[in-house]
Image: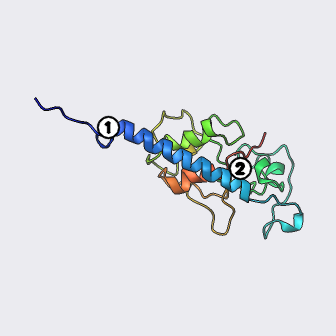
């Protein structure tokens, strides 16, 4: 009687988990590099062309969890250098704790890797389906041309490595709390 050896190639759940863990690790390393190499803006004259105007701090015009004043600030790790009218530039996924962390946000996106769906869905809609199902809250469409790594476009219908896992990783450590 011959024994049959089963390789990791034949174990789809193990392989999928391994690939997601590897992607999350790569994203975390990339985020660490991005935080170390992205200088904070120290002078308002260094603000991007067409800079953001300060609004009433109690208002969150785009509903992303950062107040308009925070988004108009000069430190991206504190929610600044963002557009107060662009929901997609702060990658805080449900549980929406106003900080981009590994367990909730990066793994939350990574566990939905490969999911596809309707990009027109409301990213604030409940209920949130269990992973690996698609939900627009976990999806972005890539970086705005000429923007910073956290200036992201609306959902594109696919949760992938470049737009989504790296997109959330570039915001690792950013917070609006």
Left or right: 173 with respect to 41? left
For the N terminus, give its image quadrant: top left
**Mark 2 lies on residue:** 62
Tell me if label 1 and label 2 are in contact, CB under 8 Å.
Answer: no
Question: Relative to the observer, which residue lies in front, 40 or 37?
Answer: 37
Whether residue 163 is visible to the viewer of this picture, yes or no, is yes
Residue 98 pos. (x, y %) = 72, 39
Calculate the distance from the C-alpha at mark 1 to the C-alpha at mark 2: 43 Å
Identify the secondary structure beneath mark 2: loop
Q: Is residue 8 above or below residue 170?
A: above
Tell me the quarter of the image containing the C terminus.
top right
Residue placed most toward the observer, 138 or 46:
46
At which x and y percent is residue 130? Answer: 48, 33
Q: Residue 11 bears which disc, if any? A: 1
Name the foreground residue: 120 vs 105. Answer: 105
Residue 72 position, x and y percent, is 82, 55
Query: Which image quadrant is residue 36 in?
Result: bottom right
């Amino acid at each position: 009687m011959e024994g049959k050896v089963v390789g990791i190639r034949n174990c789809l759940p193990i392989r999928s988990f391994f690939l997601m863990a590897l992607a999350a690790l790569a994203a975390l390393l990339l985020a660490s590099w991005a935080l170390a190499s992205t200088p904070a803006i120290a002078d308002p004259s260094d603000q991007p062309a067409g800079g953001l105007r300060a609004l009433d701090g109690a208002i969150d015009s785009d509903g992303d969890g950062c107040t308009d004043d925070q988004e108009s600030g000069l430190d991206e790790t504190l929610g600044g250098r963002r557009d107060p009218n662009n929901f997609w530039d702060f990658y805080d996924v449900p549980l929406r704790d106003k900080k981009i962390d590994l367990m909730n946000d990066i793994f939350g996106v990574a566990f939905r890797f490969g999911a596809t769906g309707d990009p027109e869905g409301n990213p604030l809609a409940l209920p949130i389906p269990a992973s690996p199902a698609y939900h627009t809250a976990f999806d972005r469409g890539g970086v705005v041309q000429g923007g910073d790594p956290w200036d992201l476009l609306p959902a594109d219908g696919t949760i992938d490595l470049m737009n989504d896992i790296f997109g959330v990783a570039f915001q690792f450590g950013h917070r609006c709390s």
